[in-house]
């Protein structure tokens, strides 16, 4: 599971002045979509059309988000502004997942060889002072 970061002061940020709730909702859904599908902040046209079927309405909402600098546009594609400054990239998430798979495989191997693996896990927990996030 991936997570997207949303600042707890987002609701009162000056960037949102004049941005409709509908546009902010589209942006928040885009943030979630991008984190879940590891798009590095890219929102493809198919996704946008599915969320806002009407061309004029979609264009208006996108324009609001572009004007507020919540979205960026490059080469005809839309990106969540500064997504990678605050959220994990696809590469980072995949690397973390691979490490977790390797860790789990080692734990299963330890259990399969007759060892419980509990001492190893206890040592790992005490060795790190804070989460890797």
Image (spheres, rainbow, N blue to C red):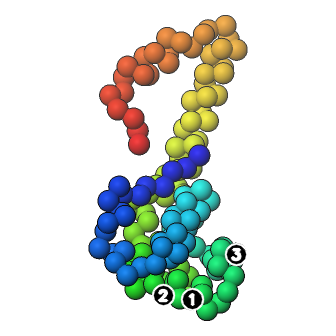
Task: Give the image location of residue 14, x and y in percent.
Answer: 29, 73
> Residue at label 1?
59
The Cα–Cα distance between marks 2 and 1, rounded to whole angstroms, is: 6 Å
Which quadrant: the C terminus? top left
* Residue 77 vertical placement versus 43 (above, below): below
Q: Quadrant of residue 55?
A: bottom right
Query: Can you give x and y, in whole percent of width and height, for residue 54 in the image?
Result: 67, 86
User: Is residue 132 at least partly visible in the picture?
Assistant: yes
Q: Secondary structure at mark 2?
A: helix
Q: Which residue is mark 2?
A: 63
Front-most of residues 41 and 90 = 41
Residue tagged by mark 3? 50
Distance in Å between CA atoms under marks 1 and 3: 13 Å
Q: Residue furthest bottom?
A: 56
Sequence order check, earlier mark of 1 and 3: 3
**Do labels 2 and 1 touch, CB within 8 Å?**
yes
Q: Earlier in the sequence, mark 3 or mark 2?
A: 3
């Amino acid at each position: 599971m991936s997570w997207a970061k949303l600042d707890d002061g987002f609701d009162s940020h000056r960037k949102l002045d004049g941005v409709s709730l509908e546009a902010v909702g589209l942006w928040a859904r885009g943030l979630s979509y991008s984190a879940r599908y590891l798009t590095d902040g890219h929102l493809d046209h198919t996704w946008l059309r599915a969320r806002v079927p009407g061309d004029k309405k979609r264009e208006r909402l996108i324009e609001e988000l572009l004007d507020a600098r919540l979205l960026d546009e490059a080469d005809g594609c839309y990106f969540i502004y500064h997504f990678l400054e605050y959220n994990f990239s696809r590469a980072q998430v995949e690397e973390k997942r691979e490490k977790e798979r390797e860790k789990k495989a080692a734990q299963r191997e330890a259990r399969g060889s007759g060892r419980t693996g509990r001492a190893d896990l206890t040592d790992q927990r005490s060795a790190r002072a804070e989460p890797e996030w």
